Image (cartoon, rainbow, N blue to C red):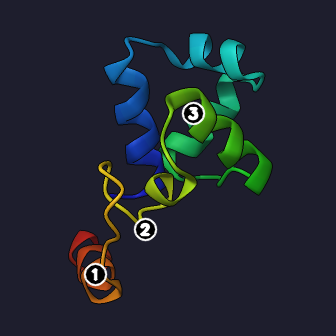
Amino acid sequence: MELGEILKELRNNKGLTQASLAEQIGFSKSIIGFWESGKHEPTASALVEIASFFDVSTDYLVGLENEDGSKIPCSLRSFTKNRQK
């Protein structure tokens, strides 16, 4: 999954709107929408804020590990990204 999809899933799982998430983590609703749509990517500091809020790792947010903390092998990450195109 891409970062935007992961963010949207985490937000929906908490029952949050883009506006309520934005308010809680200190960003605008539009930037949340841009992140979820893939039009923009969060800065490193924003990734840390998002990860902290959702109690996940930054590696999980960027698709380097599963939600349980296990690492995703590089070959599988490449395969997954190529299949989504």
- Residue in front for this viewpoint, 57 or 83: 57
Residue 44: mark in rendering: none
**Looking at numbered disc 3 in the image, what kind of residue is underneath it?**
Gly
Of all residues, the one furthest to the bottom in this rendering is 75
Helix, strand or loop status at disc 2? loop
Position of residue 26 in the picture relative to residue 81 (left or right): right
The quarter of the picture where residue 23 lies is: top right
**Looking at numbered disc 1 in the image, what kind of residue is underneath it?**
Asn
Pair 1/2: label in front: 2
Q: Neighbour class for label 3 at 10 Å: few (<14), some, many (≥20)?
A: some
The residue depicted at 59 percent of the width and 27 percent of the height is 53
Position of residue 73 in the picture relative to residue 50 (left or right): left
**Mark 2 to mark 3 CA distance (whole Å):** 22 Å
**Mark 1 to mark 2 CA distance (whole Å):** 15 Å
Of the numbered discs 3 and 1, the one sitting upstream in the chain is 3
Instruction: Residue under label 2, please give it.
Output: 64
The residue depicted at 35 percent of the width and 85 percent of the height is 74
Q: Position of residue 33 (x, y in %)?
A: 57, 33
- Residue in front for this viewpoint, 50 or 31: 50
**Looking at numbered disc 2 in the image, what kind of residue is underneath it?**
Leu
Residue 82: mark in rendering: 1
Instruction: Residue under label 3, please give it.
Output: 33
